[in-house]
Image: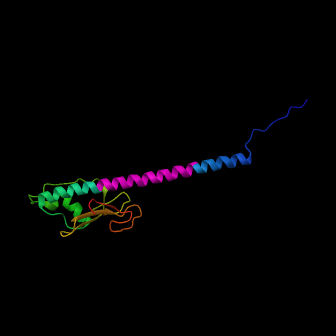
Amino acid sequence: MSVRQTKKAFTLIEMLVVIAILSILISLIAFTSRWALDWARASATEAMIAGLESALEMYQHDLGTYPASGNANLVTGLADVAAHAGNTAWNGPYMNFRAQDLQGGQVIDGWKNAYHYTFVVAANPPVRIWSNGPDKVDNNGAGDDIKSKGW
């Protein structure tokens, strides 16, 4: 009487099926995490723009105007105490920036690009703030750019 021995091993087909399933799962996880990261960056950018708008309104209420156009002027106008020494109308800082919010003296968005800030007295609205958005291309507030309210 002979005892038939069976090998306990995976066949090539079984291995390929397992590899295919794992590949599909990994690609789904990668896609989902990429989407979640872009969503988080966009949400943080929208929140920063809303915060900048509120701070600018307080600045305008106290000084009767807005800081001159330009990202660096925005930071100086809202947060630089030394730049406003002796100006009794300035009641700032109107916004405190975290180190990760600034790069080279400019406010940056979730994609590490500087925000655009313009102040034009005759424009409606006079203040515009926008981020280039996920594609990192300046579309002047159009396309996937993330922009302030009112325009």
Between residues 74 and 39, which one lies in front from this camera angle? 39
The stretch drawn in magenta includes residue 47: yes
Between residues 94 and 151, which one lies in front from this camera angle? 151
Residue, x 15% and y 63% (percent of image)? 65
Q: Is residue 138 left or right of residue 59?
A: right
Give residue 105's position: percent from left, percent from top: 27, 62
Report the label total: 0
Give residue 96's position: percent from left, percent from top: 23, 53
* Quadrant in which the N terminus is drawn: top right
Prevailing secondary structure class for the magenta stretch in the rendered image: helix
Give residue 137's position: percent from left, percent from top: 39, 67
Picture quarter containing residue 71? bottom left
Looking at the image, can residue 78 be seen?
yes
Picture quarter containing residue 46? bottom left
Looking at the image, can residue 81 be seen?
no
Residue, x 78% and y 39% (percent of image)? 7
Q: Is residue 55 left or right of residue 85?
A: right
Residue, x 31% and y 63% (percent of image)? 130
Picture quarter containing residue 6? top right
Please give the range of residues in magenta: 25-48
* Quadrant in which the C terminus is drawn: bottom left
The stretch drawn in magenta includes residue 126: no
Q: Is residue 42 left or right of residue 123?
A: right
Residue, x 20% and y 58% (percent of image)? 56
Display coloring: rainbow
Q: Residue furthest right?
A: 1
Give residue 72's position: percent from left, percent from top: 25, 64
Between residues 67 and 145, which one lies in front from this camera angle? 145
